[in-house]
């Protein structure tokens, strides 16, 4: 241990160790998907910040760890953003600096049992505050929320219906803090064990109490995934392949056909021939077709990404324009300042335009669908609002064709499981090039994933469920609770500082000692 401490006295080595420790949780996400590793992945980072010689160094450990975490979770963006990803990670990594400081504040030295017990509440709350801030669309959105690593764990999905992915993140961080306390803080081991037991009891009660989706009927939804189409006239070739795959669904009792994001590369008002061809497909299959148009609109300026429903007589009039755009991928924030990003990566040459409101579409048979486009499936509030507005099925149209050989397609497909579990509504994740997936109203996977090598149309029997989950009813209550904890902490610390100032007392901190075991005095 002393050898490690001496090695970490170098600021450079310590920063590198913090970045590496922050990167470890990526192994809990797809593609490795070691979901169980999430429960201990933060322990090295916590132990490092706890051992920092000063609060400033602990904050810097938090910053470096946040940098490592963001680079690891978004490493598949490197071919598109190049060095820009490191700048973004360095800026957003600063959000974890207060968290690192709090780790040392509550776990540094030999904390009393009360302080160790408080850490089990404060540190997960502070982590949720970080996730809340970075979830703003302009900062990149909620990709890589720690709770999202639990997308395939049945009990965790059940808890997501109670408090969303926020509750899962809180519990995962709390378990990591408890593990770190058990390893390194002997005085607080009893509170840590008590916390783990209490958490297990509370989550078990919530798991048992949470209402299960009440399935009352089924619909047949087809996903059309054309696969990679490259070269000249790729838009026309992709459309022809989607058309050919869709025709195979005729006579199979389909209720809805879903194409992926950017499945139509032309405005349908400019190309009425394409609208007529899709309408013919609707007549042949007996089902409406939900396409996604990525094109410059003829009725207003700018390029939009729009989910458009087409029936046997042509477009039904139901249209959803994507509201939350991918920073740099679909627009450049502060383009006058950051426009140079287009010269070092694949940043958008022209900003896409935003829609104004979410839309629930009626496709007949009493079926109501709520479309989301690509990046939007990462936002739990958007799917929650669609469920509140009466959507029976959530539909995510996506394209991750730029990241075929990376972990991005699997990471993206896994998010739909969480959105389904949170809302109690099945979710269809349809892509151009994979991974496409369908999940039931409890977040359980229905049928196989369509991998990045697949070019096919697949039919899924999708159970419908009604009722309202606690998460849909009460919203992001774990976040509100975390903010209350942090507000109480600030009030307590402020009152303590005020008492010390009025009394003229010095903080009760043991004096540092010299090598001769005498208190160190300034100037000596």
Image (cartoon, helix red, strand yellow):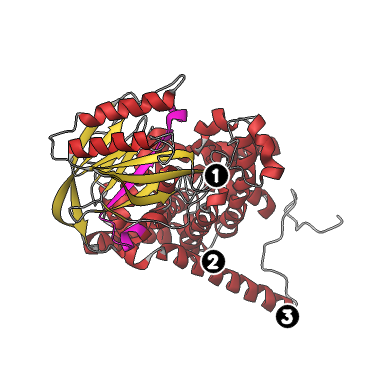
Which mark, residue 10? Answer: none
x then y, percent, for residue 82: 61, 30
Tell me: residue 343, above or below residue 157: above
Q: What element carries label 3?
A: helix
* Residue at point 35%, 34% (across, down): 274
Q: What's the magenta region?
A: 386-408
Q: Position of residue 78 (x, y in %)?
A: 56, 30
Q: In the visual, does 130 lie left or right of 211?
A: right
Q: Does the magenta stretch include residue 50?
A: no
Q: In which quarter of the image is the N terminus?
A: top right
- Compute the Cα span from label 1 to label 3: 62 Å
Question: Between residues 146 and 142, which one lies in front from this camera angle?
Answer: 142
Query: Which residue lies most toward the right here?
Result: 523
Dividing the picture into quadrants, the one containing residue 289 is top left
- The residue indicated by pointer 2 is 486
The residue tagged 1 is: 302
Residue for point 53% across, 33% down: 77
Dot 3 corresponds to which residue? 502
Of residues 43 and 68, which is closer to you in this image? 68
User: Which of the 4 quarters of the picture holds residue 213?
Assistant: bottom left
Please tell me which residue lies in front, 311 or 38: 311
- Of the 4 image quadrants, the one containing the C terminus is bottom right
Whether 174 is drawn above or below 346: the answer is: below
State how far apart marks 1 and 2 are (Cα). Answer: 43 Å
Secondary structure of residue under mark 1: loop
Badge 2: residue crowd in 10 Å (few <14, some 14–19, many ≥20):
some
Q: Point out the tag, 3 or 2, that comes first from the N-terminus.
A: 2
């Amino acid at each position: 241990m002393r050898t490690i401490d001496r090695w970490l006295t170098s600021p450079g080595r310590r920063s590198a160790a913090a970045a590496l420790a922050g990167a470890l949780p990526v192994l809990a996400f797809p593609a490795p998907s070691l979901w169980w590793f999430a429960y201990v992945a933060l322990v090295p980072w916590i132990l490092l910040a706890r051992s920092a010689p000063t609060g400033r160094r602990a904050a810097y450990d938090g910053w470096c760890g946040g940098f490592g975490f963001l680079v690891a979770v978004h490493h598949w963006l490197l071919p598109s953003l190049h060095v820009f990803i490191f700048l973004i990670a360095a800026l957003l990594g600063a959000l974890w600096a207060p968290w690192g400081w709090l780790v040392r504040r509550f776990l540094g030295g030999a904390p009393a049992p009360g302080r160790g017990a408080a850490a089990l509440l404060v540190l997960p709350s502070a982590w949720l505050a970080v996730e809340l801030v970075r979830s703003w669309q302009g900062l990149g959105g909620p990709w890589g929320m720690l709770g999202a690593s639990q997308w395939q764990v049945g009990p965790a999905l059940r808890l997501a219906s109670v408090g969303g992915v926020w509750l899962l993140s809180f519990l995962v961080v709390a378990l990591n803090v408890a593990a770190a306390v058990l390893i390194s803080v002997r005085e607080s081991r009893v509170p840590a064990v008590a916390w783990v037991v209490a958490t297990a009891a509370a989550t078990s009660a919530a798991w048992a109490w949470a209402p299960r989706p009440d399935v009352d009927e089924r619909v047949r939804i087809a996903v059309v995934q054309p696969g990679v189409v490259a070269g000249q006239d790729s838009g026309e070739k992709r459309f022809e392949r989607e058309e050919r795959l869709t025709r195979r669904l005729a006579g199979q009792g389909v209720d809805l056909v879903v194409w992926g994001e950017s499945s139509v590369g032309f405005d349908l008002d400019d190309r009425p021939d394409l609208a007529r061809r899709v309408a013919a497909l609707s007549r042949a299959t007996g089902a409406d077709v939900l396409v996604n148009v990525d094109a410059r609109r003829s009725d207003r300026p700018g390029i939009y990404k729009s989910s458009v429903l087409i029936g046997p007589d042509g477009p039904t009039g139901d249209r959803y324009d994507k509201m939350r755009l991918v920073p740099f991928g679909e627009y450049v924030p502060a383009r006058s300042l950051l426009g140079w990003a287009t010269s070092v990566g694949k940043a958008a040459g022209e900003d896409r335009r935003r829609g104004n409101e979410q839309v629930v579409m009626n496709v007949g048979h009493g079926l109501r669908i709520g479309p989301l486009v690509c990046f939007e499936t990462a936002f739990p509030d958007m799917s929650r609002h669609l469920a509140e507005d009466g959507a029976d099925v959530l539909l995510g149209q996506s394209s991750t064709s730029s990241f075929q050989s990376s972990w991005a397609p699997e990471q993206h497909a896994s998010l739909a499981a969480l959105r389904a579990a949170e809302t109690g509504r099945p979710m269809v994740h349809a892509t151009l090039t994979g991974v496409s997936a369908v999940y039931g109203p409890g977040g359980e996977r229905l049928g196989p994933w369509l991998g990045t090598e697949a070019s096919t149309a697949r039919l899924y029997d999708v159970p419908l469920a009604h009722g309202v989950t606690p998460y849909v009813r009460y919203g992001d209550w774990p976040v509100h609770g975390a903010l209350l904890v942090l507000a109480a902490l600030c009030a307590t610390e402020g009152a303590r500082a005020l008492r010390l100032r009025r009394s003229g007392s010095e903080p009760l901190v043991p004096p540092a000692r010299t090598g001769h075991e005498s208190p160190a005095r300034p100037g000596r």
